[in-house]
Image (cartoon, grey):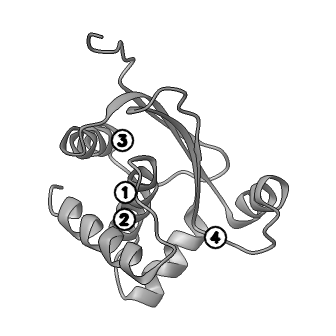
Amino acid sequence: MGILPSSNKIVFNSVNRRPGLNRSAAASWLKAVLVKEKKALNCININFCDDEYLLGINQEFLQHDYYTDIITFDLSDQDGLIEADIYISLDRVRENAKLLKSSADKELKRVMLHGLLHLCGYNDKTKGEIAQMRGKEELYLKLI
């Protein structure tokens, strides 16, 4: 089989929050991560919202009743071809940045990367998986 066709798009949407983000630079960086991970990109929609909006998604689709910074829905139907919807609470990102003594910009990039790494097949349930995920995050944050 030849190379799969790809729309090669990362689309940023503001549901009810708008980040201060250079969208073009962020898309290029995330695409570079996918190249390094040997994944093809169809389309990723990254949706920015507030805590309450993401809590509703968490309750409705995952039956979780707590705030979170990101929810990633893998919509891929072909192995190695990434297609997804990602929802990010900018409220949580700002709170996490304060707790981690980091900038909101760096934390937003880490969270976007975290969702992308899940799409690449990385998990964060066990101590070993968490260590691997953190290592990949640090590696790819340096590409910016």
How dense is the environment of label 4, judged by Cα within 10 Å: few (below 14), some, or many (20 and up)? Answer: some
Amino acid type assigned to the residue bearing label 2 in the image: Arg
- The answer to which of 117 and 101 lies nearer the viewer is 117
Q: Which residue is mark 3?
A: 23
| Rendering coords of residue 126 (x, y %) | 47, 78
Of helix, strand and loop, which one carries label 1?
helix
Q: Secondary structure at mark 4?
A: loop
Q: Which residue is mark 4?
A: 68
- Quick one: quadrant of the C terminus? bottom left
Closer-to-camera residue (16/83): 83
| Badge 4 amino acid | Thr
Residue sitting at x 81%, y 72%: 65
Q: Which residue is mark 1?
A: 113
User: Residue shown at 53%/32% (left/top)?
Assistant: 76
Whether residue 96 sits left or right of residue 81 in the image: it is right
**Residue 9 % position (x, y):** 40, 26
Q: Residue under circle 2?
A: 110
Where 35 falls versus 58 (above or below)? Answer: above
